[in-house]
Image (tube, helix red, strand yellow):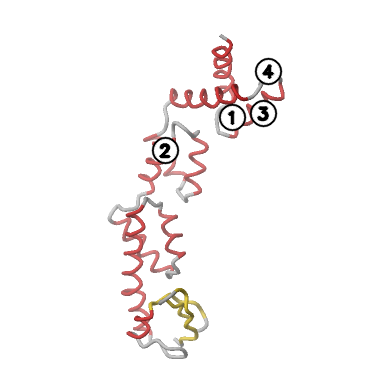
Amino acid sequence: MVVTGIVEYTKGKYKIFLNDEFAFVLYKGELRKYGIKQDGILSDDMYRELITVVLTKRARLRALNLLKVRDYTVNSLRRKLKEGLYPDEVIDDAVEYVISYGYVDDLRYAESYIRSNRTSRSRHEIEQKLRMKGISGDIISEAFENEGPGEEEEEELIRRYLLKKCRSTDINDEASRRKLFAFMYNKGFAPDRVRQILDEVLLDITM
């Protein structure tokens, strides 16, 4: 392979292009160590060493350091490593590495997210957030079976939403009520449940 480009990426780090295609990022010292120069030849053996030794070790360490700060889903960790311009096969290895030690677990992440948000967000909202984080529907369903809010918790959440709306908005006219039901429906709450609890809330307010 021909080194067709060595472009400074950040201070001390360079993008390496092989055969006119971006390959990876190396430090200045690594360029010297491996004798990588513009228009030079990079042997297949040296390329494999850079991938399987240098970059693989670096990506694994980067993944571990990211996980020290906060939890990541598999998908979000993969995106974060992609931002670091690691090759796909190096990213795959790093993700599999942290998964093998239990450092990344989408089910555990989803369960934790549900526990933290089940009293402030509807199931629909939580599902949307978890899907945006790249967690599969099957894992989300399992997480809800394990940690999902009970009927009483959901009723209390609906009640809080309705009390807030009723105190800040006049809902005596039909148009306002339709807007309220549309709002609650978009939150993912069943209309019949909302209607039932709304009657109770209005009764409490007028008493």
- Image-based side of 32 in relation to 173, left or right: left
- Which picture quadrant has residue 94? bottom left
Tell me the residue that label 2 is attached to.
114
Q: Amino acid at mark 3?
A: Lys
Q: As displayed, is residue 85 above or below residue 191? A: below
Q: Earlier in the sequence, mark 2 or mark 3?
A: 2
Q: Amino acid at mark 4?
A: Asn
Q: CA distance from mark 1 to mark 2?
A: 19 Å
Q: Characterize the local packing of mark 2: few (<14), some (14-19) or many (20 or more) Cα atoms within 10 angstroms.
A: many
| Callout 2 secondary element | helix
On residue 184, the disc is 1
Q: CA distance from mark 1 to mark 4?
A: 17 Å
Tell me the residue that label 3 is attached to.
179
Q: Residue at position x 31%, y 69% from top?
A: 57
| Callout 3 secondary element | helix
Q: Earlier in the sequence, mark 1 or mark 2?
A: 2
Q: CA distance from mark 2 to mark 3?
A: 28 Å
Q: CA distance from mark 4 to mark 2?
A: 35 Å
Q: Amino acid at mark 1?
A: Met
Q: Quadrant of the C terminus?
A: top right
For the residues labelled 3 and 1, say whether their Cβ atoms are less than 8 Å apart. no
Tell me the residue that label 4 is attached to.
172
- Image-based side of 86 in relation to 99, left or right: right
Query: Which residue extends farthest left?
Result: 101
- Which picture quadrant has residue 10? bottom left
Q: CA distance from mark 3 to mark 4?
A: 12 Å
- Image-based side of 38 in relation to 66, left or right: right
Q: Residue at position x 42%, y 36% from top?
A: 144
Q: Amino acid at mark 2?
A: Ile
Q: Residue at position x 56%, y 34% from top?
A: 187
Point out residue 127 in the picture as x, y percentages from the top left corner.
49, 40
